[in-house]
Image: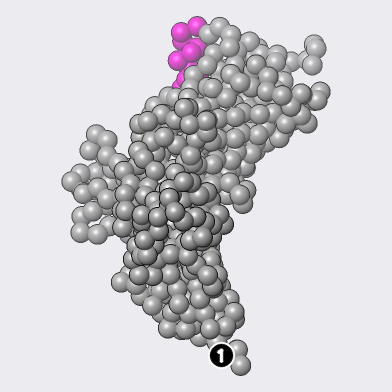
Amino acid sequence: MAGERLISSDGIRHDGRRLDELRPIKMAVGVLKNADGSAYVEQGNTKILAAVYGPRSIHPRHLAYPDRARVRCRYHMAPFSVEVRKSPAPSRREIELSKVIREALSHAIFLEQFPATAIDVFIEVLEADGSTRCVGINAASLALADAGIPMKDLVAACAVGKVEGHLVVDLTDLEDKNGEVDMPFAMMYGRKKITLLQLDGILSYEELCKAVDLAMTACEKIYAMQKEALKQRYLALRKSIEEGGG
Amino acid sequence: MPLYFKDWDLVVPGELLAEGNYKLGSNVYKEDGRIYSNVVGILKLTRGTINVVPLSGPYIPKVGDLVIGEVIDVTASSYVVDIRAPHVAFLHASEASTKPINPHEEDLRKLYDVGDMIVAKVIAFDRAFNPSLTCKERGLGKITRGRIIAIPAVKVPRLIGRRKSMITMIKSETGCEIVVGQNGYIWVVGKTPEDEDLVAEAIKKIVEEAHVTGLTARIMKMLKDKKRRQP
């Protein structure tokens, strides 16, 4: 995109979105038969599958916490998820993202209800086009709820960035690579608690406040969609039976 | 005391259910006077107590539960049993049967071996240690005939029904013997395999439609229709 601008003078981004507009989002719950809980989320071209297993016994046994469950998280990018084949071995970046996602999710779970067990979360990036950790959190939080694991709230996540001097919501890969700032953000929206806030780049105090406001507005929309996706799984059948009279 | 949902409404984790002096049942929590749901489930309000009946989730053993499990290992003095809970359960040789068995003299594998399915009762569990089982009662022990159907443990109350209405109805309609393990394993013995098929079909329908009211009537209708078609 050398020479070309990512944001036009009337505030339209390279993919036709307004500055505060999310990409088209698709969510599905319970997509994997063998997992205890699973979800698939698409945000534009970012496509992510999440699976949850557990609470289950933990091996090796010394990893178990005597008073609560241990959340283990693996964020992984498929070799075909990016333009140039990525080695399937976990990279430094993937190991770090696994850690921050684990921390963003574990604060929402009632871990003390399952002492000495493991809750395993697998996040597989099938296609990467920016904001993969945020979409990963959205999918993993749906998968946890689908597994019936008691949670304080669903975790909704969205990235905010600064591109050519404008604050924009839900970055694509292009905006992430060519922009000045990337700020992944996750929160338990219903409880108004932030569980992930990272900042890659420099923002002034005023810009940071504005970015957090933008992220919260975006999370509100995503949170509503997550609730809808969880309910839709059961409501469709209930409706068809009630209308058909048995 | 505002209540934001009706009885039988579908709720998700973090959903604000009510405010004020309601009693807390299962799968709800309270913070700053507000009551929220823990899980994806159905809201049930009974005499001022707010409950959410979950639609999925793990089996958590309770003392006194009747369970069906698979023997996965035999040690020097006990059996290791998979009861589909977060932890494996132990069945000590002294609790293994109504007839005493001495692990020093006899081979424990003569009684139960790896792969055997057994009916047992939970005698101890406090979430921090592995649950303990007993088979020292009539009707407990190894399963030698019939078939076992697996369903999610959270659907077991629905299969039993209020005051056992559902399970009694299925038993009388099909003539099968049914033992329901609280962990979601159902043991069915019928006079013919066709009768067992009928039970399996009914159980499948119950699992799929657990969150819709009027289930017992629908299952009864289904069983009657199927039987009429059979010669």
- Say which element carries label 1: helix
Relative to B85, residue B178 above or below? below
- Can you give x and y, in whole percent of width and height, for residue A230 in the image? 50, 48
Residue range of the region highlighted in magenta in the rendering: A204-217
For disc 1, the marked residue is B228
Point out residue A177 in the picture as x, y percentages from the top left corner: 70, 15
Whole-percent x and y of residue A14? 72, 24
Q: Is residue B2 left or right of residue B98?
A: left
Amino acid beneath label 1: Arg
- Residue B78 visible somewhere in the drawing: yes
In the picture as drawn, the residue positioned furthest to the front comes out as B105
Q: Residue at x 65, y 16 (%)?
A: A92
Main SS, magenta region, reads helix
Is the residue marked by circle 1 packed among few (<14), some (14-19), or many (20+) residues within 10 Å? few
Quadrant hosting residue A139: top right
> What residue is at 54 percent from the left and 22 percent from the top?
A99
